[in-house]
Amino acid sequence: MTVEDIKKEVLNWAKKIGVSPKEIHFRQMKRKWASCSSRGRLTFDISLLNESAEKRTEIIVHELLHLKYPNHGKMFKLMLRNYINKGL
């Protein structure tokens, strides 16, 4: 898996979810898998390259949903479960 492969995954999921990240970056992160800025910048831990497809999907969808839902409220959790479980 390469950075470009994961960027394609992110963009495919973004299209399904109906969001448009402004930037997608990768770097080493010590405390979390990824982050999403209020300006639409997604940053992923470089170690995501070595994770399973299921784990990558969970992390990617989680961060993309923050472009619609900035917190972890009820709607965020509902949408996360729906996208992950149904693979929409």
Image (cartoon, helix red, strand yellow):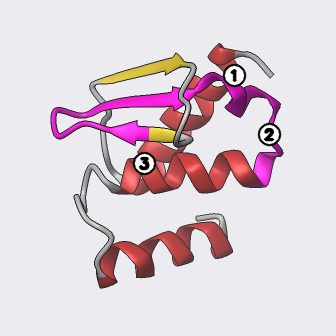
Mark 3–mark 2 Cα distance, whole angstroms, equals 16 Å
- The residue that appears at 76% across and 55% down in the rendered structure is 54
Give the residue type that dot 2 points to: Glu
Q: Earlier in the sequence, mark 2 or mark 1?
A: 1
Q: On the image, numbered disc 1 is attached to which residue?
A: 5
Look at discs 3 and 1 and give the one toward the viewer. Answer: 3
- The residue that appears at 65% across and 16% down in the rendered structure is 3
- The residue that appears at 32% across and 84% down in the rendered structure is 74
Q: Is residue 11 above or below residue 62?
A: above
Give the residue type that dot 3 points to: Glu
Magenta-drawn segment: 35-54
Q: Quarter of the image for the C terminus: give it.
A: bottom right
Q: Is residue 86 above or below residue 69?
A: below
Residue 73: x %, y % from top left: 28, 78
Give the residue type that dot 1 points to: Asp
Residue 49: x %, y % from top left: 74, 27
Look at discs 2 and 1 and give the one toward the viewer. Answer: 2
- Classify mark 2: helix, strand or loop: loop
Horizontal arrangement in the rendering, residue 38 relative to residue 11 (left or right): left
Mark 3–mark 1 Cα distance, whole angstroms, equals 17 Å
Q: Earlier in the sequence, mark 3 or mark 1?
A: 1
- Classify mark 3: helix, strand or loop: helix
- Classify mark 1: helix, strand or loop: helix
Residue 16: x %, y % from top left: 47, 52
Q: On the image, numbered disc 2 is attached to which residue?
A: 51
Residue 11: x %, y % from top left: 49, 33
Q: Earlier in the sequence, mark 3 or mark 2?
A: 2
Q: On the image, numbered disc 3 is attached to which residue?
A: 63
